[in-house]
Image: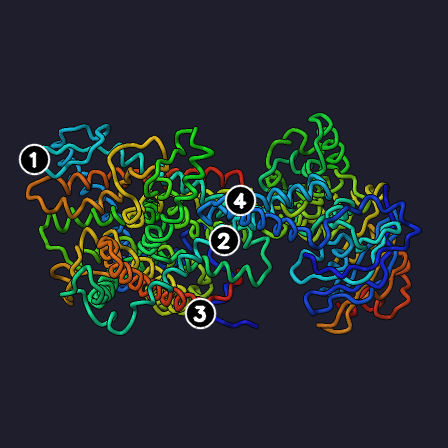
Amino acid sequence: MDIKPTSPTSPPPQDQPPLAVDKAGSTGTAARPGDRIFLAFSRGSGIALLVVMAAIAIFLTVRATRALTKNEGSFLTTFEWAANGAHPNFGIAVLLYGTVVSAVIAMVIAVPVAIGIALFISHYAPRPLASTIGYLIDLLAAVPSIVYGLWGALFLVPHLEGLYKWFDDYLGWTGIFEYNDGTPRSLFTIGILLAIMILPTVTSVSREVFLQVPKMHEEAALALGATRWEVIRMSVLPFGRSGIISASMLGLGRALGETMAVATVLSTSFDIQPSLLDSGGGTIAQNIASGFKEATDVEGSVGRDALIASGLVLFVLTLIVNGAARMIIARRKEYSGANA
Amino acid sequence: MSNITVNKSADPASAPQLSTLRQARLPWWGPAAPLALALIIGCGGGALIGLESKIQWGLISAILFVVFTYLLTLKVEGRRQAKNQLATSLVWVCFLLAVIPLASLVYETVDRGSTVLDGYFLGHSMDGTQRMLAGGGVYHALIGTLEQVAIATLIAVPIGLLTAIYLVEYGRGKLAKTVTFFVDVMTGIPSIVAGLFILSLWIIMLDFSYSGFAGAMALAILMMPVVVRSTEEMLKLVPNELREASLALGVPKWRTIIKVVLPTAIGGITTGVMLAVARIAGESAPIVLLVFGNPAINNNPFEDAQSSLPYYIYEQWQNGNEPSYDRAWAAALVLIAFVMILNLVARGIARWKAPKTGR
Amino acid sequence: MAKRIDVSGLTAYYGSHMAIEDISMTVEPRSVTAFIGPSGCGKSTFLRTLNRMHEVTPGGRVEGKVLLDDENLYGSGVDPVSVRRTIGMVFQRPNPFPTMSIFDNVAAGLRLNGSYRKNELSDVVEKSLKGANLWNEVKDRLNKPGSGLSGGQQQRLCIARAIAVEPQVLLMDEPCSALDPISTLAIEDLVGELKERFTIVIVTHNMQQAARVSDRTAFFNLSAVGQPGKLIELDDTERIFANPSVQATEDYISGRFG
């Protein structure tokens, strides 16, 4: 009945990229000039992409090396960022700590909540409500980070003070939840803001996976007399595990590299605070954005190169996170029997 | 699941046997009573003790709600049902917890942004406006954003499209695998790193000036993998029969791709491109490094500093006074509106042109 | 162990669409009852109303009574979860939990209903796998994922999973339609053995299968597309196939339509 040309009577096999048709065309030795030109262009684009990636790594490394050779402090352990003068002295430790800690806080808050919302949309909410919420969440994922930053600085920060005092009263003894009055422009605030920012992304990817759980697996659990939660635990979560991991990694990558929202909210200081609630600290991306203007003003300094060196560290960090996610997913695939 | 027509139970004579299937169940007010109780204690108690932040009130109520429903179900229905109820309450609480900040974000932006947003604001730049005073506008930033995004799109879309075609229609062997892998890696590059790359190549090594074009190149790097991914997905949805039918007619492969495959997938590809545009339009980090900001109108993206909407918001926020905050919120509202319209149109196209796969 | 099912005046809906109308019948304990009829006549829907699985489909709604030994499944206060635990189900396509091993698949239902000691659990698993004629094929690889078995073995695994919780009734929704003839035969033999212990209801498209395995056969039909399905007649299988009392049944069985 549906004679739209797009009705996929047989979509090409997804996990075997070379389509059957390819044999007919691409490698034919007597390819037409049109074919050859077209292939050259499309293959060229693919190669261009690889060149860009390689260039990013090479150029960052070259500039970073220049800065590191002139650095009079130790790049790994110096708790200072004074790269603009004649005697540059800077280290990544504080920034790396801030980047990792704020991203981890964001993950700890965002991932469980995101899974909750995703389950809410896929399995709990009444139908019309569910699709509306799903749609809104997708839209929220598109809100620019600077807007989150503005909201964080002008709305969230003033509202967190009471909460932090409360944390201090009950959890202050742990040391990490100590709060000495001041504006709460701290790593924990950044963590909360980043959590709110990555929430839509993690939610929409997880929801997508939960909705793909084959009906028959859920019915298998239902027919054994499982409650709704047991159905989710037995068939939805195991099926969606690799999807949740990749969604989380996506969120983690975004949290690690987030620049402007952090630059807007955090009040920077170059030391590692024992308490997460006290203002101070910094992240790599934030330091690049806030320190950039100053670094360009000084002739002949290594200021910009030093920032590039820190950017290289961030680059490597995100590569590791993405690589790890990919490996976890690949390993899970063997056992998940997603083909069943 | 609750829309079952419940019949009156079987006659009382058979009552003794009814034990196996029956379960004590919570009455209809099951979750409502704990909710009300939790809200009263959370908010009332919060107000009484004088907790400053409403966030605390909410958190207390949420925790109490979860605990109350759990205990009530445990008492009435038993352990398994209580666990089930616990999960249900938690999922609802998650949903509410997330909705509040996100709704507040939208509300604040619209509420505070609309105070100075008018024709004057959209039609004037900040040139000659005192930072501390009201006035000025966003015109220069709007021009900057439009030009930078347009250039980035012109660079990224052809490369992204062709790469996706290569991967789906020709791709096999090592090169295709490598490209696929690095497209994934590239998706995860933080925007500031893309900015640093263009900075070291274009501005430090090749000694060009800060310009809208430099920013656009960094944006293009961020846009490319997104375009490749979405286009790839769409091309894979094109049924193989169509390609075979065209090839069987003796149409060369490249014409098959251009005349049959691309037109079939064009709706989805457009959607993907528009979503990618919406994403880079909000990027501010590369702009800080490469476009540098400019309070005046600069229509030439290839020479000298420009501004852009996200950068403008950051700049106004840094000024740190009320008139600037008003301008920042107004610009945020303009930016969100721009991004949302792109999103809505893109999704509209997707729905209208969607291959009827049913998902 | 096995219980009788008495259905009276049962009507099921998908949203506002009436799928089956006013069905009444009795299913005898320790026997196999087969449901036959053309596609779309509602026999699977009816089967799913017998363990309250119909209502998990969006818009699914049921009116009428289903008595399991005098206890109404749709009575107030009845927990659908306990109903499904008491009345097991096997589906059209084998659906073992893909992330669980063979052992865990069989033990899944037991673990839901309380804690068992390790050896207690393995006893039940062994008994159920033997009951499903699968033990000899899998006893050496109980820790391998269930999705690694062949289609027929997977289906028998699902039967083992269903009988492990000792249900009163076993519902089978076209259990052989995705299987090859040899696996089909194995399942049919198994059904013959299981009816000693359970009340079995089986939906099938294959009339020979109904004739081979069932004691009683119910024929469902619908007057036109879009109309609700109805029970035409229910009788001993031999009579249905040799000498049905309704003309439509005879037409269907002799291949004149459907």
Q: What residue type is labelled 2?
A: Glu
Q: Dot 1: few (<14), some (14–19), or many (≥20) neighbours within 10 Å?
A: few
Residue A37 drawn at (x, y percent): 25, 61
Q: Dot 3: few (<14), some (14–19), or many (≥20) neighbours within 10 Å?
A: some
Q: What residue type is labelled 1?
A: Ala
Give the residue pinned by disc 3: B353
Q: CB of mark 2 within 8 Å of CB of mark 1?
A: no
Q: CB of mark 1 within 8 Å of CB of mark 4?
A: no
How far is the residue under mark 2 from the one under mark 4? Answer: 32 Å
The answer as to whether the residues below labels 3 and 1 share one chain is: no
The answer as to whether the residues below labels 2 and 1 share one chain is: yes
Q: What kind of element bears circle 1?
A: loop
Q: CB of mark 2 within 8 Å of CB of mark 4?
A: no
Q: CB of mark 3 within 8 Å of CB of mark 4?
A: no
Q: Dot 2: few (<14), some (14–19), or many (≥20) neighbours within 10 Å?
A: some
Mark 3, mark 4: which one is toward the viewer? 4
The circle on residue A86 is: 1
Give the residue pinned by disc 2: A208
Q: Earlier in the sequence, mark 3 or mark 4?
A: 4
The circle on residue B60 is: 4
